[in-house]
Amino acid sequence: MQTRRIAIGVAVLAAAVTLAACGPDDDKEPSDAASSTTAAATGGASSPAGTDGKAPASPVNWPAPADATARVKAAGLPMLGAEGQVLHIHSHLDVFVDGKAVTVPADIGIDLVKQQISPLHTHDTSGVVHIESPVKADFTLGEFMTEWNVPFGKDTLGTFKAGGGKELHVYVNGTEQTGDPASLKLGAHDEIAVVYGTPAEKVQVPSQYTWPEGL
């Protein structure tokens, strides 16, 4: 009997030690761990950028159109099964709005779903415009802007209009152009700059582009 009482006492004591080791806060550990994991994954609470508590203004973003084929058709150009080789030249386009560079997106004039391509297109965001046609022809800046779905004319660039102190200028190899900029012909290794904004928003207009080997 004494041996049995000792065994029971040992068991009770072991249970008490186990409960004490677990402690009253153990039930909270799973939720605490989840909170810690969430904080680590999100980096904790984010504060708005900028000293005034507002996010900085985003640059103008004109993405490549979702329906490239429709835009190429609107430009009056054909869609091809492969890049043409009869005329194979490249121009470079820079666009500036209010003193800041606007990205010329990749895949303008390329229908990735239908695997078709316009003779006038981009492959990346470098601003290089590829003119690769199966026939000799003149291609214009207006056609390219139509493919890009960015309205463009003597006083229009996208949603922006000249007037009220804002001006629109177009340069080729550093020389300002006159007349309708949409009719500007794209020439081999031309550096074209479209600049919109006030005269106070200084832009260093490029006169040339450093071409990669092979272009």
Image (spheres, rainbow, N blue to C red):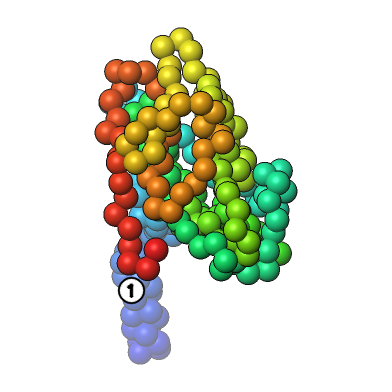
Residue 127 rendering spot, x and y as whole percentages: 42, 49
Looking at the image, which residue is at 42% across and 30% down?
A: 177
Is residue 171 rendered to the left or right of residue 142?
Answer: left
Kindly identify the residue that appears in the image at 40 percent across and 22 percent down. 197
- Residue at (30%, 46%) from the top-left corner? 208
Residue 22 appears in view: yes
Residue 105 vs 27, above or below: the answer is above
Q: Is residue 94 left or right of residue 63?
A: left
- Please give the residue where the numbered disc 1 appears in the rendered image: 13
Mark 1 nearby-residue class (10 Å; few <14, some 14–19, many ≥20)? few
* Residue 115, horizontal then vertical, whole percent: 67, 67
Q: Quadrant of residue 147?
A: top right
> Dividing the image into 4 quarters, which one contains the C terminus?
bottom left
Q: Secondary structure at mark 1?
A: helix
Seen in the picture, residue 138 relative to 169 is either above or below; the reply is: below
On the question of residue 148 being in view, the answer is no
Q: Residue furthest top?
A: 164
The mark total stands at 1
Residue 75, image x, y percentages? 67, 44
Question: Which residue: 37% across, 68% down?
Answer: 214
The kind of residue on which mark 1 rests is Leu
Q: Nearer the viewer, residue 104 or 184?
A: 184
Q: Nearer the viewer, residue 29 or 211?
A: 211
Q: Is residue 122 above or below residue 167?
A: below
Query: Which of the two residues, 168 or 197, is positioned nearer the viewer here?
Result: 168
